[in-house]
Amino acid sequence: MLKVVVTGGAGFIGSAVCRHLVKDKACEVLNLDKLTYAGVPESLKEIEDSPLYRFEKADVCDKTAVAAIFADYQPDAVMHLAAESHVDRSIDGPATFIETNIVGTYTMLECARDYWNGLSEGKKERFRFHHISTDEVYGSLGDDGLFEETTPYDPRSPYSASKASSDHLVKAWFHTYGLPVVITNCSNNYGPYHFPEKLIPLVILNALDEKPLPIYGKGDNIRDWLYVEDHAKALVAVVASGELGETYNVGGRNERTNLEVVETICSILDELRPRTEGSYKDLITFVADRPGHDARYAIDATKLETELGWKAQENFDTGIRRTIQWYLDNDWWWRPIREGRYSGERLGKA
């Protein structure tokens, strides 16, 4: 039975990975999470009583705590998702992103290396360190082309720069020390348990509260959307079978402008929970663009699809409908967040 340490497992993607590992793969999972504002333990409600699941509150920058977890848990793999991940927050306060995303990744690598060096040959050969990153490290695309694993890095925000830095550290630890690593870079995720600072959950919940639906600039920025449960399956496939030292891009092949995304959400809500008067589209409000807003992201996932046999199961139309229905059915999860930690105010105005 595979034993996996998942860092950031109380976050959006991390919780999906934990649920998939425990429920679908019968793996033992230790969730290492600091529980920042975006860490929501309730996202693990489905598995919190499983004997396969364990939670440890710790900071990935705390070398003593992380080393103790390695020594005690004796994992076969690490899936490193813990990161500050919101571009707007990185504009307002970059220091936290440098600390968590760069120093935290360095700390995880060093603790993993110390642990790996002490393993028997058999266990040493099986061990994997999987670093989960973002397509934003590649910068911004024009009207044509896709991000490939060989695309030069060109980060444009404090967030993407910090993630690019962490990617380079992971590659250096592979080439310098031989640490068995794999890296994935993903497109924009969406789905259940998504903290409501991000576009899709923010728009859904603002609409339900009859609040304005803010769209940056003209709404013509394009993103490739990936359903989070498809992403979790891809990540597990890579940590299990990916070639050491390699990068795999994970994308949904679902490009949409931000305006198209918001209008689709409004149309589905008009059907599932109609307003008393008018359409939810009447709430759309165009606001000043954020600084350094990348024009377009799009992933070429061919390498992952051909080498490991993964393919996204949800297209955007099916996935967004599932997502909206989940938010309609699960206000027990999101309402305390909206009423406490984040009510929907604009970030990233620096």
Image (spheres, rainbow, N blue to C red):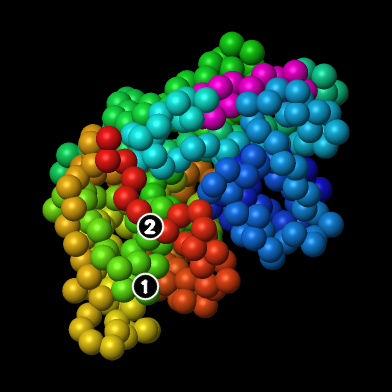
Residue 114 in the magenta stretch? The answer is yes
Residue 53 in the magenta stretch? The answer is no
- At which x and y percent is residue 98? 47, 25
Q: Nearer the viewer, residue 72 or 245?
A: 72
Direction from residue 293 to residue 59 in the image, left or right: right
Element marked by disc 1: loop
Is residue 134 shown to the viewer in this render? yes
Amino acid type, mark 1: Asp
- The answer to which quarter of the image holds residue 295 is top left
Q: Is the magenta stretch mostly helix, strand or loop?
A: helix
Distance from Cα at disc 1 to Cα at disc 2: 11 Å
**What range of the chain is rendered magenta?**
100-115
Direction from residue 116 to residue 293 in the image, left or right: left
- Which residue: 50% across, 54% down? 341
Amino acid type, mark 2: Gly
- At which x and y percent is residue 100? 54, 29
Q: Is residue 230 above or below residue 235?
A: below
Is residue 219 shown to the viewer in this render? no
- Which residue: 65% across, 55% down? 41
Of the 4 image quadrants, the one containing the C terminus is: top left
Seen from this angle, which residue lies furthest top?
Answer: 176
Q: Is residue 273 above or below residue 25?
A: below
Element marked by disc 2: loop
Query: Badges 1 and 2: C-beta atoms under 8 Å apart?
Result: yes
Direction from residue 24 to residue 13 in the image, left or right: left
- The answer to which quarter of the image holds residue 86 is top left
Residue wearing tag 2: 344
Q: Nearer the viewer, residue 196 or 209?
A: 209
Earlier sequence position, callout 1 versus callout 2? 1
Identify the disc placed on residue 209. 1
- At which x and y percent is residue 28? 78, 49
